[in-house]
Amino acid sequence: MKIGMITDSLGELSFDELLGTVADLGIKRLEFAGGNWSQAPHLALDRMLDSAPARQEFLAKIADHALRPTAQQLGGNPIGAQNQDFSNARDARISPDIGPSARSR
């Protein structure tokens, strides 16, 4: 069995600290929060949308820790909808480049 987690669970850590921590804990899969209720603490969405090298660096760091991305979480909280942008258009554009299908590139 491969254990995974959503990265907002350790949102106070930097991206590099997150990777080291989850690898040390034996976690193998990561679901990256990126939109609506999340502040996307581990995704530099604008930078990654504009830069293929930034996306490649992101995936390389994950692979260097023997981890794999499983999803990009874009969910929101309908109860608190007044504070959220449910368009997800910008956030969702990065998913094909950093999600599970990207690991074989």
Image (tube, helix red, strand yellow):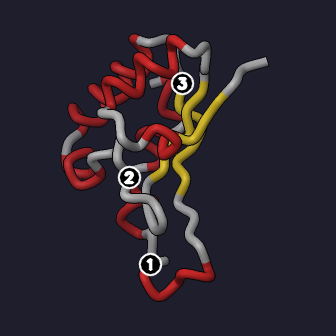
Q: Earlier in the sequence, mark 1 or mark 3?
A: 3
Circle 3 sits on which residue? Answer: 68
Question: Where does the image place residue 44, in percent across and percent down from the top left?
Answer: 27, 47
Give the residue drawn at x 42%, y 78%.
85
| The image quarter in which residue 54 lies | top left
* Amino acid type of the residue that numbered disc 2 sits on in the rendered structure: Ala
Which residue corresponds to the image point at 57% horizontal and 41% vertical from the top-left?
A: 6
Residue farthest to the front, as pictured: 12
Disc 1 crowd rating (10 Å Cα; few below 14, some 14-19, many 20+) is some
Q: Quadrant of the N terminus?
A: top right
Please tell me the numbered disc located at residue 23: none
Along the line of sight, which residue is nearer the eye, 52 or 78?
A: 78
Front-lying residue, 35 or 80: 80
Q: Position of residue 87 (x, y in %)?
A: 45, 77
Expressed as whole percent of the image width and height from the top left, the position of residue 9 reads 52, 42
Write the residue at 41% across / 69% down: 89
Q: CA distance from mark 1 to mark 3?
A: 28 Å
| Residue 40 badge | 2
- In the rendered structure, the answer to whether residue 7 lies left or right of residue 40 reads right
Q: Closest to the observer: 99 or 1? A: 1
**Image height check: is 56 above or below 45?**
above
Disc 1 secondary structure class: loop
Give the mark count: 3
Q: Label 2, label 1: how many angstroms apart (C-alpha)?
A: 13 Å
Residue closer to the observer: 61 or 26 = 26
Residue that badge 1 annotates: 84
**Quarter-of-image position of residue 52:** top left
Mark 1 or mark 3: which is in front?
Answer: 1
Tell me the element at label 3: strand
Q: Residue furthest right?
A: 1
State the CA–CA distance, disc 3 to disc 2: 17 Å
Where residue 41 sits in the image (x, y, percent)?
34, 47
